[in-house]
Image (spheres, rainbow, N blue to C red):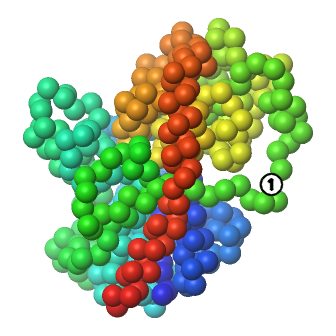
């Protein structure tokens, strides 16, 4: 089949689809990706054709100037203001990129344009999610409502999933509707009728979704480090020294005060008596001269780094959460917005990490206390190790590719 993967997201929301695309290509499918232009090297590295989506300067501000750090409301206001023109452009680009495909796929970021384009092209759209959306359960609250009070009972918890799904689309609904009309000549909501499978790229051991013959929890779609990648010798030497090392970084979550956050982190590291690998990412932390107890990098392959540290502190993106859990090490999640509080709550509920600390409430003292617990709590560390082994035993990409194979047999 000719398959188009639409993945318009941050790096952590794109990388799992690189792994999925690689698996589909190895199975003999003709795969192309539609993704932000800055991620072209990720797809080139695995031999997948990539069609770039434009990034407007104002839209890029959402990820580069710390707006997410200001909270959900600020981020949604910004998106409502800036998204309409951008979604029109992305819809045009996606329509051109997907001409001639047999099937389209993607998660929430891809569905913003992809499911309407699929309707226009009259091809199936297979939902491939990184979060447990569209599956109400009383086992946990909705992705966007992790704060939901459990005293509201089973019915209340299931209702939180309905509210969560509506909240996830709130900022996109109007610009999506406008793009359907002005770019695609379609009216009404997107047509999602069909018996196509819905695939989820996380582990059933992490999120126990309700059983359903249509929904398939595949396991994580993990992209291993390139075979040609080698760690800097200084990093290997740093990790080889005696004493616990933690990894701290906030991925694509930029900060308005990166130096202030970095000072906070350094104070906590030294209060806790650990050493740290600091990952500056897209500006969440400032780069620093190396010291005996700290080494800095923009980014490092998670599948290489995380198994080599005692604990991981991160922002709670779906991909980073999966990488830390797969490594079998305990974690602290410092959520900024979107689905990050949900993943923080899941890690704590599973007993493989400490209670999340929202970015706005993070202090050196709280972070130091969390680091001590992550390093010293042997029961927590044992639980994390056992969960990691279960996750690593799953073949998430293989399970997803098999479902695409079944789709082909039905055509």
Q: Nearer the viewer, residue 374 or 289?
A: 374
Q: Residue at x 19, y 28 (%)?
A: 149
As helix, strand or loop, the secondary structure at mark 1 comes to loop
Crowding at mark 1 (Cα within 10 Å: few <14, some 14-19, many 20+): few
Q: Residue at x 32, y 71 (%)?
A: 197
Please tell me whether residue 70 is drawn above or below residue 202 in the rendered image: above
Please tell me whether residue 178 is drawn above or below residue 162 in the rendered image: below
Please tell me whether residue 303 is drawn above or below residue 383 in the rendered image: below
Q: Is residue 249 left or right of residue 154?
A: right
Q: Which residue is mark 1?
A: 229
Q: Quadrant of residue 155?
A: top left
Q: Residue at x 42, y 23 (%)?
A: 355
Q: Is residue 143 visible?
A: yes
**Picture coordinates of residue 340 (x, y %)?**
42, 39
**Picture coordinates of residue 188 (x, y %)?**
16, 74
Q: Nearer the viewer, residue 224 or 392?
A: 392
**Picture coordinates of residue 103 (x, y %)?**
40, 82
Q: Quadrant of residue 123?
A: bottom left
Please tell me whether residue 307 is drawn above or below residue 33 in the rendered image: above
Q: Residue at x 78, y 60 (%)?
A: 227
């Amino acid at each position: 089949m000719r398959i188009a993967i639409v993945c318009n997201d941050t790096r952590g929301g794109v990388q799992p689809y690189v792994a999925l695309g690689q698996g589909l290509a190895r199975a003999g499918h003709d795969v192309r990706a539609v993704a932000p232009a800055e991620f072209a090297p990720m797809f080139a590295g695995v031999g997948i054709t990539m069609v770039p989506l434009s990034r407007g300067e104002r839209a890029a501000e959402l990820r580069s100037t710390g707006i997410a750090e200001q909270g959900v409301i600020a981020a949604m206001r910004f998106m409502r203001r800036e998204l309409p023109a951008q979604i029109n452009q992305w819809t045009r680009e996606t329509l051109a990129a997907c001409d001639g495909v047999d099937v389209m796929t993607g998660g929430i970021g891809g569905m913003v344009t992809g499911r309407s384009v699929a309707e226009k092209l009259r091809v199936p759209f297979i939902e491939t999610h990184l979060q447990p959306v569209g599956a109400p359960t009383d086992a946990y609250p909705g992705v966007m409502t992790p704060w939901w009070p459990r005293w509201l009972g089973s019915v209340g918890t299931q209702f939180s999933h309905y509210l969560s799904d509506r909240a996830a689309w709130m900022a996109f609904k109007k610009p999506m509707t406008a793009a359907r009309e002005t770019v695609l000549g379609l009216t009404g909501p997107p047509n999602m009728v069909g018996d196509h499978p819905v695939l989820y790229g996380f582990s059933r051991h992490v999120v126990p979704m309700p059983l359903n013959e249509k929904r398939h929890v595949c396991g994580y779609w993990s992209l291993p480090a390139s075979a040609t990648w080698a760690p800097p010798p200084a990093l290997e030497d740093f990790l080889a020294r005696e004493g616990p090392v933690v990894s701290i970084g906030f991925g694509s979550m930029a900060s308005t005060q990166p130096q202030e956050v970095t000072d906070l982190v350094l104070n906590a590291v030294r209060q806790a008596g650990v050493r740290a690998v600091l990952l500056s990412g897209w500006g969440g932390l400032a780069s620093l001269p190396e010291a005996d107890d700290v080494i800095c990098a923009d980014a490092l392959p998670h599948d290489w780094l995380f198994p080599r540290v005692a604990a991981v502190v991160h922002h709670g993106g779906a991909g980073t959460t999966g990488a830390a859990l797969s490594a079998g090490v305990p974690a602290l999640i410092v959520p900024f917005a979107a689905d990050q509080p949900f993943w923080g709550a899941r890690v704590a509920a599973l007993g493989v990490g400490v209670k999340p600390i929202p970015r706005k409430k993070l202090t050196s003292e709280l972070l130091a206390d969390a680091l001590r617990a992550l390093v010293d709590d042997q029961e927590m560390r044992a639980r994390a190790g056992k969960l990691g082994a279960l996750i690593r035993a799953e073949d998430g990409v293989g399970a997803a590719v098999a479902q695409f194979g079944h789709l082909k047999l039905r055509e």
